[in-house]
Structures are given as C-alpha cells and as structure tokens.
Amino acid sequence: MTPRTLTLASVFLVAGVLVSLPQNAGARDTRDTRSEPQVNDWARPVSENTTADGPRRLSAAAVTDTLVLGSWNFNGPGSCNAQGWTTVDNSTNPAVMTHVDDFAGLGGGSFGRLHAISGSRSMWCGFRPNAADPLVCGYAALPGYGNSMDQILTLKDCLYPTGDVVFDYYLTWDVEPGYDFVTIEMDHCDGNWTPFPSGGAGCGYYGGGSCSGFTWTGEDSLVSLVIPAADNGGQFRVRIRATSDAGWSDQDGMWDTDGAYITDDLLLSDQNGPMLPLEDFESSPVGATEVPDWISTTNQAYGTYAALTPGAATLQLGNCSRDITCLWEFYQGSTYNYACGGHPEQQVVPFGNASAQYLDNEIWSPWIANAGAGNEYIFEFDVMRDLPLDNLIFFVWHIRSRVDGACPGQWQDFNFVYYGTQRDWERVQFPVGTLLEPGATEIQLAFGVIDRCPWWCGSYGTGACHSNGPLFDNPRLLRVNTVGPQWAIRDIDQFQDNFAGDGTLTGTVRADMAADILPSYSPNIQPGDSAVVGVDDTQDGLGLDAATGSAAVYCYVAVWPQGQPGKSGIGLQAPETRLGNIRYPVMGTWTDASGVEWTCVRADSAGLGNIYYTPLDRFCVDFRDDLFAPGDTICFFYAAKNVNDVDSYAFGSNLERWSNDREAAAASPAEFTCLPAGGYNRGGDILYVDGADGRGEQPYWDIAFASLEWPSDRVDRYDVRGSSSGLSNRPDGRVTDVVTQLVGPYRNILWDCGDVSTTLGGGDALPLKTDDYGLLNTFLDNLPNSGGVLLIGDDVANGVTSSASTSGTTFRTTYIPFTLTSGDHKQTFPLSPAVIPVNGGCYSDGFALSGACPL
C-alpha cells in the first residue's frame, strides 16, 4: 500500500514513542505454541484501578430500594472516633502450632502424610480439626496450616563444634509452592538468623520457587545437611522455620495440605560424634511444644501502624479533592519519611524490619446485623492511593459473614491487591453478595494495607519508595432490594483475543482464558483452558437445569461472520467430559430481536480449591478447540437462574453489567477475536493493541479512525484483558510465528498502554513473562519497505528506557531515533505539525507512524 502518515496529536495528550523501519533488518523466531492447560489459576493478580480490573457494579436488576446496613465517618464528637472498627496486625500468630503429635484419629490426612516418621510420635507444624477451638474457628480445611504463619522450632542452646557439622533429620513437607516455605536457618548465637545454605540445590528452602532441588511436597525425606566449619564459626544454633503469606492455605481452603511439615530424628554431629542426644520425640507428651533440646515458638509480630488522623494532618497531593475529616492511615509510629517523593516532612508506610517481616495491617468493622431484603450487597469506601506499582504497597478489602453467632466464614474477596498512582480521592464499589454465607445474619468488613516486597521485590517492582498512601474514609455496606443471581466476574478469567496455535493464518484458534495459570516463578506461559465466572443467590439459591440437574448457569454464544457451518448449535459443544457426562452441553438456541441466533451452553462447576470463589458458586465454560479460525469474532454473555426461575444476565465488554433482560445482554455482549480478523480481510493493515482494555482508551481511537483515511472496519484490535494485572496475555503470549501472523497481514502496530504501569515485557522477569520487545524487534526486522510501530501510554517511555532485557535494549538502541527521559515519562524529540523525516521514516506531531513517509 502507499505509505501514509497517521496524525493523532489532536486526540491524545499522552506520551508516545515512535518506532520507524530500520535500514538493516534481521529476523528471529518467537516462542512455540502452548500446551493445553487445565482449569486452575495460580495467579496473584494486581489491579491498578478498582473501577477497571476489579469487579464493580455499573448496572444491575431494577432497584426498588436500598438499605444502608452500616455507615461510618470516624468523626467526633471532639476528636476522631473509630466507631467500633479495630486495628489488626496479620503478622500476629494465633498460637504455637508446631508440637509433638501421634496423629491418632487423623486418618493419614488428605494426602496420607499424617503419620509418625519413625516410632509413634513426630514433631508436626499443623492444626487438628476442632470446631470448639477458637483458634481454628472458621478454618475451611483441616488438618493443615493457616495464613500469615511464622512458626519456629529452635535449638535452645548454642553449640560449639569442632570442624564441620552434619545436621541429620527426617522431613515431610507440604506447602503452597513459591509463596510458603519451610526453611533451615542458622545464627551464631547472636539472633541474626539466615537461611542455610543461601542458594543452589539442597538450599534448605522447601516450597519450590526460589531454589533448585526441591518441590513443594516431600515425604519422609532423610536430609544430611553439612554446615562447614567456615559457616558455623565454631558456635551456632539451627532452627526450622515455617512461613506462609496472607492467602492460599488450609485456613481459606484455597490450598489443601496435611500441615506445613513433620520432622523427626534430629541429630547434630561434629567430627567427635553426636553433640546432643538424638531427638525422636518419643518421650514427650502429645501436644508438647518443648522437648529437652528444642522449643517451638512464633516470631514476634511486625506491629500495628494503622491509626485515625485528621485529614488536615496528612499529606494529600491531589489537585481535585481533599479530605479534611478523620481518616485511616497506616504509618502511625513509622520512622520513615517521604523524601523519595520530595516530602521529607511526611511519615510513610514502614519498610521491612530486621526479622524480614513486612507490613500487613487491616481495619475490621464491628459485626453488622443483616436486615432488609434483596441479595445484592455493595461494599464501598473512599480511598486515596499514591501507590505506584514499584512501591509494592497495595490496599486490600475483605468481607465475611456468620449465621446466628456461629463460627464466621473465611474472609472473602476477589483475590486482587490494588495499587495506582492516583492522588485524588475516589469512591470505589464492590458487589459482594456472592461472597456471603447463605442465610447470613451478621456481616463484617475489612480494608487494609499489605507490603508485597517479600514476594515481588525484584519482579513487580523495587519497593524502594513508600508514600503515606493509601488513606481510607467513609465505608458503607448497602443492601439492594433486587432479585435474581448475583455475579462476581474478573476480566482476567475471561476469553482472550488469540491467534492460530500452529503459527499460520488459517489454523484453528483456541478459546482460552486471559490469565496464565502457571506459578509466577515459572518462565512458561499456559493460559487457562476455560472462562470462569462466580455467581450465586445467597437469598433464594441457584436453580437447577431441568434437563441435566446441574446448576442453572449458562453462556450464550454467537459467532461472526454469521451463518458459518458448524459454528452454532451443537457444533460449538466441547467434547470434554466429567464422570462420563459432557461438561459444557449445548442446551439449545435463541434468536434475539435483531435476528441473531445465540447458542446456549451450560456451564460446569469449576472444581475445588482453585481461586477466590467458594466451590459451589464458581463455574467455567469452554468451546471446541478445533473450531474457530482467524477472522472469527465470538460474542458471549452469561445467564443464571435462581430457584424461583428469576433470570440474571452478565454482559458488557468486561462483563461488568447486570440485568434481568436477555435482550439487553444480547445487544451488548463481551467478545474475543481470532486474529487476523475483519480489518485485514477487508484490506486493512493496522493492528491496534488495546494495552489498556476497559480503561477508556478505545473510544478515542475509534474517533481517530473515523476521522482518518482508514475506516475502523479495516483495523484489527487485540484487547489485553486485565491490563494492569501484569498477566502474560500481551501479544507475545498468543502469537506463535511473528513473521507469518503479524508481518504477513499487518504493516502497522498501534500499541496504546494508556495509564497502565506495566507496559511491555522483555521476556526476562516478572511482572510480564511475555517478550513483547522481542516480538516488535522481529516485526520491524521483517517489514518489507513501509510500516512501523507506535507506542503510546503514560509509562511507555519510562518502560522502554528502563528495560534491562536483551530484547528491550535491542529495541531501544535499534529503533528509537531520539532520546527518552524516564523522570517525567515524556520523550524529548520536537513536536511539530510538519512531517519530519526520522531515520528513514517520519512522524507528525510526535504521534504519527510510518516507515517510509514521503515529504
């Protein structure tokens, strides 16, 4: 096609990076196709904007009345008033968990590990099931261990060895991989404990992830750990330490175990023989936490830094709003200040302490009586963030309930932690009806702050700078008098735009989830095989499908172009089975008012222990993997029915809208596209990557395309779902062959990251596993004689400048013909209405794109 210049300066007031076609081009291949995944989600997602990636209520069934179940402003009289809310330090362990046990009555546990390793007794780090024990009241799955655990079995006295020491012990361990660990630690009798050894095979970390040689489970393994004289220093102690993070354990039921570890036959020897008697725990009573030479303890808590303060007494940098009333902050007593942000006078959220502990503080409401009618509940509050992702300080919220004063259920949320650079106050809302216990008579709320540096420093960010945010105020719990099932849907669990898995323009395209289901420490990418939704009716209960007897939860599907053989009705049905039955049976078709035929597919239970919903209200759906092809757009929305035959529909581009009207849902469905699609088929050569999907960028592009020579129907769009969550669903996570699938159909890639902080990946580390710079390098290397790439977004220039990956460095040094500055996230090349040639290409107003633009 004839090269053209695309002018967008009149539409966008954001930073952009122009990349033009180089003079000398090479080529390289990208990653292979992915293997078929199972339905599971290991993601620890983040959300930069609670009104974008986090679930929220935009429209629902008709509202007849709304009851305020609880509302608090924390003001006076006379001074700030907590109004029944209490501060909680989640690093406080409820009890010493590691004890001598004979495992009687436990039946071997869920996985057969609960037995004495030798003799009749061993030391076990775990809780027994006991409904009368307030320490484990509400635990979802026992026996096992809990969240925020820090349990230590320590040698009481200092040893003074001669030469090397051998620490022999048996160990059975079972912890969540990559986040929870059993660690061997050593000190020189000075309290400065460190893991031993610090790395490599046999590194002393049991839990996988950070070292080679160990998985997250092991049974009755004999370990002989050598502590050389150079390391033990002639005096030392050892301890076994079990730690867990704030989620995914037996406490919340999302990771079922037989307890963190069991150990037995502990023996320390130097060159002169045993230094202490063999500890086999046989002479100690069941339940003992102390034996002759060893003692079980918990670590000292991190501390509580949450407090009420007048708004006038804390820094608020936003220009649009200030809260001068009483509000919650999380830096009371901190010794750190905001010098890194230019405000050394302001205290900030504290950093980790000498014991490698980090802030995990929350504020819990009093118990709230559940009154009124309706099964829609909304938890809302005001928040001021000032939380760049690099800080690794996030805010969280939860809700739990109980029935008639019984043991409360687990704290529930949508498994997000939230951040954002916004410094103005925002009112956020979360639909929480699906998270309550059926028949709940009381409800409790929580919000708080967590420092994720121990898990994400060096991957999602540095954690080097903390602000005084987040700040909270004015929480409320509303009950809306609506009927019908309620929805809890995360965008990252929905179908993602995709390319053919065989690297061609004609092969089949899988219908896969946006989220990567492999652990974050795995370098590989494996999209979830199905889409997942949460739905429940805690007031009336979900109905049953009359034909199958399963829950009445469905997905309506229509494929464009319409009328293709085999792409409607029974042709969509996936062959997957469970217990001999089709998992996602086609239940019939329905034609809407505009004449579109929709196929109704029944969803299946998503199984146990996989994510953030309780097992009974989480459902998945899938279609044939050998059906869709490039050019297809698949539109879909969800439906559910309660026991009273009241329907509810979830629809909209990110499934954020609810209604009792099926026609309304059909008129505004969600969709995913098999690329290249209609734009290419109609003669277009532009791929628009919406790297800020759902955050408001696309309408501006639609306006721009409509005003330019290229109509929007000749532009293909790739939506990055959950764009701020650091997923591996950017283009490199789906394209198999760049030359065939991108260079073949397209000459121009317009990639807009909007206000998302995680822009493009370099294939080197988290938060993005994708090598998007490598993909662009290959695309630009292989373009014939025209075309190029335009990157736009608040943090794009900063991302390009700071990328230390090989592909990111190549991209920056090869294709960026001007200087980028990362401080203000803007580029320094001149802006002009004239078309200026740059390195064989051109741009206009700093936002134009081409590889060989004629003057």
Image: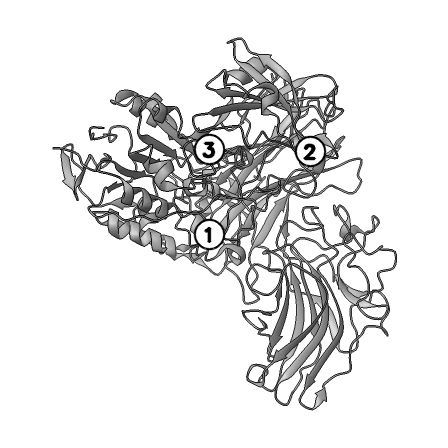
Q: Mark 2: which secondary structure?
A: strand
Residue tagged by mark 2?
A: 577
Image side of residue 723 versus residue 130, left or right: left
Image location of residue 245, percent across then percent down: 61, 54
Q: Mark 1: few, some, or many residues within 10 Å (few <14, many ≥20)?
A: many
Q: Residue at x 61, y 88 (%)?
A: 163
Say above or below: 408 vs 91: above
The residue type indicated by label 2 comes to Thr
Q: Mark 3: few, some, or many residues within 10 Å (few <14, many ≥20)?
A: some
The residue type indicated by label 3 comes to Gly
The answer to which of marks 1 and 3 sits earlier in the sequence is: 3
The residue type indicated by label 1 comes to Leu
Say above or below: 112 vs 773: below
Q: Mark 1: which secondary structure?
A: loop
Residue tagged by mark 3?
A: 507
Q: Quadrant of the N terminus?
A: top left
Please state which of the two labelled residues, at mark 3 or mark 2, is closer to the viewer: 3
User: How many numbered marks does the figure carry?
Assistant: 3
- Circles 3 and 2: CB distance less than 8 Å? no
Q: Is residue 785 visible?
A: yes
Image location of residue 387, percent across then percent down: 45, 46
Residue tagged by mark 1?
A: 766
